[in-house]
């Protein structure tokens, strides 16, 4: 019986599009999936977020009132909904200002080996934009300035970001540390 899912998360509106694949337990809530996405994209969970699944919006109850539609509680809905409702893909939006839209694809369901520690990072490609860079357009300008030492904003952005930006380096070691931390938080206390 399946108790886990392999998900592929792709950040839309960028070319090339950063993506990550993770294994997650179906017992996890969508709030837990949000935490997993934040870790996979090395973001800091400092903005509003929501999932759009089968015509409904899921987020945190205190986020309600930022739009016209009802927001259902992501802390109570479990990922078993993906299996039970045969959901193959859905949308995750982070930072309504920058509007980072992620397509989440369910690659498959599986039975996790006994003692597995999930969530777990599998693979990915392309570094994700830094927080507060200004959406897809701001990220393009950021990359242009970072790649050109003669660009008038190059030095300012190096200081702001804290160093050079390598699009190919997804920092997989750091990703794995964040995923292990999340997996450890899910382990039953002895």
Image (spheres, grey):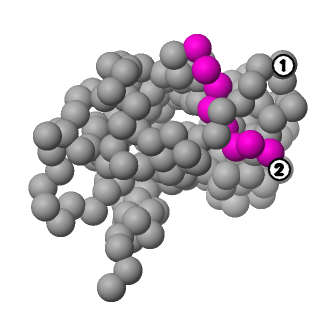
Q: How many marks?
A: 2
Secondary structure under tag 1 reads: loop
The stretch of residues the image draws in magenta is 55-62
On the picture, is 53 further left or further right than 5? right
7, 81: nearer the viewer: 81
Instruction: Based on the picture, tell me whether residue 60 belongs to the magenta stretch.
Output: yes
149 versus 106 height, above or below: below
Q: Which mark is residue 140?
A: none
Percent position (x, y) of residue 169?
44, 48
174, 56: nearer the viewer: 56
151, 94: nearer the viewer: 94
Percent position (x, y) of residue 172?
38, 55
On the picture, is 153 further left or further right than 42? right
Q: Residue at x 37, y 21 (%)?
A: 85
Q: Residue at x 81, y 35 (%)?
A: 64
Image quarter for residue 118?
bottom left
Gap in angstroms between the C-alphas marked 2 and 1: 39 Å
For the N terminus, the image quarter is top left
On the picture, is 3 further left or further right than 44? left
Instruction: Based on the picture, tell me whether residue 32 belongs to the magenta stretch.
Output: no
For the C terminus, the image quarter is bottom left
Q: Residues within 10 Å of mark 1 (few under 14, many from 20)?
A: few
Q: Which mark is residue 68?
A: 1
Residue indicated by mark 2: 156
Image quarter for residue 88?
top left
State yes or no: discs 2 and 1 in contact (Cβ < 8 Å).
Answer: no
Q: Earlier in the sequence, mark 2 or mark 1?
A: 1
Q: Residues within 10 Å of mark 2 (few under 14, many from 20)?
A: few
């Amino acid at each position: 019986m399946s108790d886990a899912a392999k998900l592929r998360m792709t950040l839309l509106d960028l070319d090339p599009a950063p993506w990550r694949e993770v294994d997650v337990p179906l017992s996890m809530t969508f709030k837990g999936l949000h935490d997993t996405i934040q870790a996979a994209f090395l973001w800091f969970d400092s903005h509003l977020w929501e999932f759009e699944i089968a015509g409904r919006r899921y987020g945190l109850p205190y986020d309600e009132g930022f739009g016209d539609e009802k927001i259902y509680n992501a802390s109570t809905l479990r990922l078993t909904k993906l299996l039970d409702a045969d959901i193959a893909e859905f949308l995750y939006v982070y930072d309504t200002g920058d509007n980072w839209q992620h397509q989440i694809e369910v690659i498959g369901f599986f039975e996790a080996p006994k003692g597995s520690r999930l969530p777990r990072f599998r693979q990915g490609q392309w570094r994700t934009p830094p927080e507060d860079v200004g959406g897809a357009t701001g990220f393009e300008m950021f990359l242009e300035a970072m790649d050109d030492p003669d660009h008038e904003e190059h030095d300012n952005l190096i200081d702001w970001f804290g160093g050079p930006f390598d699009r190919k380096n997804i920092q997989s070691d750091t990703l794995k540390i964040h995923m292990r931390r999340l997996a450890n938080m899910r382990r039953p206390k002895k």
